Amino acid sequence: MADSQANPSAQSELMDEDEPFFSNLDIFLFSLIAGLLIYWFIFRKKTEPIPEFKKLESTAPTTRETSFIDKMKKTGKNIVVFYGSQTGTAEEFANRLAKDAHRYGMKGMAADPEEYDLSELSRLPEIENSIAIFCMATYGEGDPTDNAQDFYDWLQEGDADFTGVKYTVFALGNKTYEHYNAMGKYVDKRMAELGAQRIFDLGMGDDDGNLEEDFVSWREQFWPAVCEHFGVEATGEESSIRQYELKVHTDLNMNKIYTGELGRHKSFENQKPPFDSKNPFLAPVTVNRKLNKAGDRHLMHLELDITGSKIRYESGDHVAVYPINDSVIVNRIGDLLGVDLDAVISLNNLDEESNKKHPFPCPTTYRTALTHYLDITNSPRTNVLYELAQYATDPKDQENMRKMASSSPEGKALYQSWVLDSCRNILAILEDLPSLRPPIDHLCELLPRLQARYYSIASSSKVHPNSIHVCAVVVEYKTKTGRVNKGVATNWLKNKMPTDNGHKATVPMYIRKSQFRLPFKSTNPVIMIGPGTGIAPFMGFIQERGWLKEQGKDVGETVLYYGCRYKNEDFLYQEELEEFEKTGVLTALNVAFSRDQAEKVYVQHLLKKNKEVVWRLIHTDNAHIYICGDARNMARDVQNAFYEIAEELGGMSRTQAVDYIKKLMTKGRYSQDVWS
């Protein structure tokens, strides 16, 4: 651009020169054009080898087999269980179903759709008595999980012919969400539309109720239906089948051992972008302060430094952090099982063809596995109890563990009360069943992976490009057994203090993109509703609206509805919010202090109190509505408040009001970032 702008002035200067100079210029231009032509003729051929190089590159052997059909044929498998999993539960269920197959004289494999070419599903009938099972979780607002995104896109665009393909779907979701089990329902419907044969009804798992019970009940009916369909009988093999074998390393170089890395060995010592779920960035903690002024809870604000990481984020995105387990629990498990936690081990898959060589990075130590890789604080699922029952030396303990894993009403009730309602984790079970002392390697094989925790980012990258802010409440509660259970991630984060003695506290993290976005037009008004830590993404939104104003942009009304218990106790970010209101960045700051008066006041009450302004913003001014926080009560109550406002001020019936809000959702004008 600078060069082209320079030319006119250069030409005007040339006009004042004598005639001979023009002939010099002509000669110069002629020489330049001639030179360029000669250069092009001589050197243009040098670019030709590039396609050859690309061709060579593409024919290089791939390190991973993308044909699940070929793999099934090679290993004699006839059941493939695909999973769409964000937190590991759907993957766990898929593994259980694949393992179940042997009881019916079949062989199954669990498969990540991201690793295979799913257009090959049409070839499944080449394998006799074959079935594709889909364990599909729904993430966020009816979205597919990260690993199922490509499969979802392909299903939407594709016109495959699945005639002869037999399938079933088990969906994992949460009833408190608007788009309950959307992904499972879609896969079930779409497979049928493409000609596949549904051999068993869609299973609906509800994490707001008892997901484990939903799965067990569905599974207990599914397998007899499969047997009937194919005319096979159960082999009656109920025995435990190990998936991995233990190898103890006695002379391994300590440099070869995994110490908590999630993918590449030594990735925490030698950090290389891009950073993602398999390669998190170790972000130093620069700020960790308590937000609430009083009360028995601990609400905190952390700032993570991403300088030099090339990580980009937008307001509304989530930060995922990988926590580690409490060393007290890890040591206690080691003591109860009488093992050396620092023994170096590998758990190797007995199925050599499997893509999953180990249940977690190996070789490592039991201590590292229990600290970094395994979930030891959630209540174990029934399959874990079933597999461990064989190691209980007291017949009564063995009987109860097997009963809890059964589908009998009595067994389900016992699991619900003794495990779930009592919040017993694996340590509590080992403590309360002294006859149960399983081999630690089998326990490590059965326990699910410790998952990343997601937090709504409480900052704007326009204002804080090298810093990610987190707002969270520390989880700690007493169980029915009198034990104190602590949230893994929040208690770990609470102790991550920035230090000045040369050692920086770091947090392994990556960014998960979200659909929770400010309007494209800054002139659109926004109504943000976020009580408690639901304020988090709105701190980012407000910062960004302030930044836009500073850039001289026209910014629409920015309205916040915030709620907390007491004004003088847990009014989070009070000073910042009041300053935003004072400077006009926040048009209106509406705060519901639920317990500062005899009658409880919540955000939905304030919405109804300001109904005329709210209705004008939505109906006349094209406002975008954002809700963040508790899905079970708050999000539902707020939605009902909007229905009532639409009925009263829009003159609608309840059905019309519900439809009106649904249309706002479809248009992207009613967004939720909620959890239960």
Image: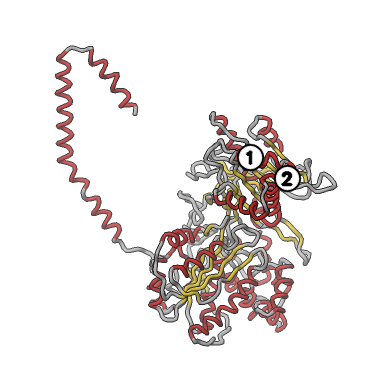
**Viewer-closest of 541 and 186:** 186
Left or right of 546: which side holds 601?
right
Quadrant housing the N terminus: top left
The picture places residue 243, in percent across and down from the top left corner, at: 52, 75
Q: How many marks?
A: 2
Crowd band around label 2 with a 10 angstrom C-alpha radius: few (<14), some (14–19), many (20+): some
Residue at (58%, 49%) from the top-left corner? 664
- Label 1 secondary element: helix
Separation of residues labelled 1 and 2 (CA atoms): 14 Å
Pointers 1 and 2 in contact (C-beta within 8 Å): no
Q: Nearer the viewer, residue 435 or 163?
A: 163
Q: Is residue 367 visible?
A: no
Tell me the amino acid under the disc marked 1: Leu
Decide if residue 446 is on the left or right side of residue 119. Answer: right
The disc labelled 2 sits on which kind of residue?
A: Lys
User: Residue 66: x, y in percent?
Assistant: 39, 66
Image height of 605 relative to 351, above or below: above
Report if residue 657 is visible in the image.
Answer: yes
Way the structure is coloured = secondary structure
| Residue 505, label in figure | none
Question: Relative to residue 12, is residue 34 drawn left or right?
Answer: left
Q: Quadrant of residue 335?
A: bottom right
Residue 608: mark? 2
Task: Say above or below: 665 vs 39.
Answer: below
Residue 323 at x, y percent in the picture: 60, 55
* First along the sequence among labels 1 and 2: 2
**Dot 1 crowding, Cα within 10 Å, few <14, some 14–19, many 20+:** many
Residue 617, numbered label: 1
Residue drawn at x 76%, y 63% as measured from the top left: 479
